Image (tube, helix red, strand yellow):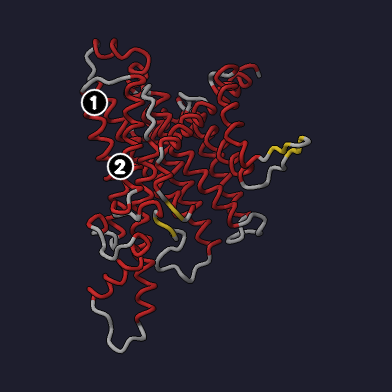
Amino acid sequence: MTEIAQRSFFLRNPSVLVFLALLSVFTLAVTLASEATGFGWMSTSFVKTLGKTLCLCLIAIAMDLVWGYCGILSLGHFAFFGLGGYMIGMWLMYERTKDIVAQSLQNEVLPPTPDELRDAIGTQIFGVVGGSDIPLVWTFADSLFIQLVLVVLVPGLLALVFGWLAFRSRVTGVYLSILTQAMTLALSLYLFQNDSGLRGNNGLSGLQNIPGLTGVSQDVISIWFFWASALALALGYLLAAFMVSGKFGSVIRGIRDDEARVRFLGYNVEAYKLVIFTGTAMISAIAGALYYPQAGIVNPAEIAPIASIYLAVWVAIGGRGRLYGAVIGAAFVSLLSSWFTGGSAPDIPLGTFTIQWTDWWLVVLGLSFVAVTLFAPQGISGVFDKLVRKS
């Protein structure tokens, strides 16, 4: 019976199989081209860029679920993404610092006591913000299992509380978007403070150094994270496709199109909204937990409201209401951004003025968003669908 249900799901959603097949081929191609396991045609830094892009595709899927399918324009999902990075970053930074401190004290006549070791770790981590005591929020920073649980628990609880307060008050439309943006701004401003317990503006750094793997080169670690990112994207896409293909998907589409009518039919609209809002927050946090070890650093600027606005632009450019559209939009903008801002795009001299793409990239992104809105409201994926139908 289960096999029949699985077959029917894939038969009803052939795009899922196509996506998984393309992702598998892409993962294999990058693996063979990498310096760690292949021919060395692809640099380690570019493998990390591709791994980070896969993580951005995963949060774009989450954004598409909450906005494209449920109609909630959240301008706060990158906050959950950043919180996921902070949760795993605490363990990475604590354990790495612990190893460094232990090595520096190993030549002492008397071995350090646990309290002395902890004080030295606190000084090493928080000396940059004028502190030495390990804050309460770092209580479980030495436990990988607990921090992995907190990766989804902390953003999930924040989304649950915020969503319950907002949806029970029946806040909708632009007012809800403003509230999510205010939540993101408040969280960002709090994290910028040195007494937040998370090193203020300095954030958490050195996350690319995995504790216990000091003898493993970065090219190997980068391909491991790339595989993990690809697996997370595949599972996230499969879960999202399953959610939107059945009754649940029909209800959230109905909420998007006519919330009052869905409520009149007897559905608990607020419960459906809360489930999708909280669930996508957790997906975003998992994406962030995979992204920031590849980026090497997470700071409050990553949670600023502008990041969530960019996320909405990615989904709009790719085509909201289509899961593969969200992936296309995130991948397209992420890789293009890396090309323009990484110095690969040549400057254009115009006599007395020179266009430097590192400064003009956001203008290009804004113009692209306007062009898509005016001439291709269904995004890049909508144009692709039309070409497929014509052929």
Q: The residue under label 2 is which amino acid type?
A: Pro
Label 2 packing within 10 angstroms: few (<14), some (14-19), many (20+): many
Q: Along the line of sight, which residue is nearer the eye, 383 or 171?
A: 171
Residue furthest out toward the right: 351
Q: Position of residue 281 (x, y in %)?
A: 34, 37
Q: Is residue 96 left or right of residue 350?
A: left
Quarter of the image containing the C terminus?
Answer: top right
Q: Position of residue 251 (x, y in %)?
A: 32, 19
**The quadrant where residue 92 appears:** bottom left
Quarter of the image containing the N terminus?
Answer: top left
Q: Is residue 153 above or below residue 159?
A: below
**The quadrant where residue 129 appears:** bottom left
Residue 155's disc is 2
Residue 114's disc is none
Q: Is residue 267 left or right of residue 315?
A: left
Q: Along the line of sight, which residue is nearer the eye, 294 or 131?
A: 131
Q: Along the line of sight, which residue is nearer the eye, 366 or 78?
A: 366
Residue 271's disc is 1
Q: CA distance from mark 2 to mark 1?
A: 18 Å
Q: Residue at x 58, y 60 (%)?
A: 37
Q: Position of residue 337 (x, y in %)?
A: 59, 40
Q: The residue under label 1 is which amino acid type?
A: Ala
Q: Is residue 33 left or right of residue 241?
A: right
Q: Is residue 154 above or below residue 176?
A: below
Upstream in the sequence, badge 2 or badge 1?
A: 2
